[in-house]
Image: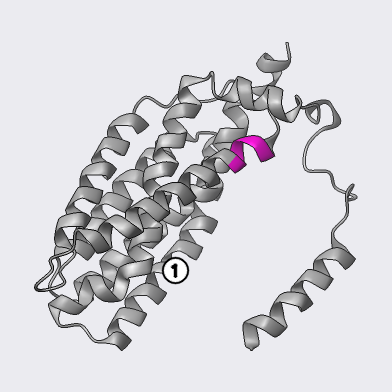
Amino acid sequence: MIYGLASPVVAILFFVFAKDRPPTPPCAPEDEERSLVYDGLNEALKRPTFIYLLVLFFVGLGVFNAVTTWVEDIVRPRGFSVIQAGNIGGLMIFGGILGAIIMPILSDRSGKRTPYLRAVVVGTTLGLIGITFAMSYWVVLMSAFIFGFFLLSAGPLGFQYGAEITYPAPEGTSNGLMLLVGQISGIIFILAMDIFKNPTTGSMSTPLTVLIVFMFIALALSTRLKEAEPLPERNS
């Protein structure tokens, strides 16, 4: 009921206050020109760096969707209660909110994207290892925070980086593709974790280990990411 009542209120507020052309535009007028959607899609998919980024989102969002969906089943075989599982999931989201604020700020100040995207993959992998194998409740909590902090910060970082390396393709095209592959992998990973869990104990250590391997593959691919060219060079 709370979510149902809040949703239309937020929707109404959006339509009241959102403006097509705000007093402070998001970018300079000369940077507003973008290619058509289908032309932009075709152009984006021709760029190897963007393909690597799509693979990172395929793995990262898939892992996040799978872990958050099965968090209770992941920790139950280790003796954790439903309340503890809720705390683990909540701390994961809380860490993600902080990460989504802090990491993009650091990236903007440094003027770099790729080092932070690599850091995201490393931190996510470490957090996932802890969630998979830790037996101590406090270690799992810490791992969940690290996992959420780094993985959810990949969203704003990746969307901005994707828009920069696919310019002048519309941002909606690059962002939409990244979300699309992440949702596809989420469905696949969620179903696979349930299929390949231990039928006797219910343990999900085996499918989680496979996800850790995927994260290491993503880390290897992240080393091939290149910084986007400065905007003046792309307009010259």
Instruction: Decide if residue 202 is in sight here.
Output: yes
Q: Quarter of the image for the C terminus: give it.
A: top right
Q: Quarter of the image for the N terminus: give it.
A: bottom right
Q: Tell me: 71 left or right of 75.
A: right
Query: Where is residue 146 drawn, in percent x and y?
Result: 33, 61
| Residue drawn at 67 percent across, 16 percent down | 234
State the SS at label 1. helix
Give the number of callouts: 1
Quadrant in the rendering for residue 206? bottom left
| Residue drawn at 13 percent across, 66 percent down | 198
The residue range painted magenta reads 172-176
Q: Is residue 23 magenta?
A: no
Mark 1 — residue?
93
Query: Where is residue 69 drawn, in percent x and y?
Result: 37, 68
Q: Tell me: 64 left or right of 127.
A: right
Q: Residues within 10 Å of mark 1 (few under 14, many from 20)?
A: many
| Residue drawn at 41 percent across, 43 percent down | 58
Query: Where is residue 36 drawn, in percent x and y?
Result: 76, 26
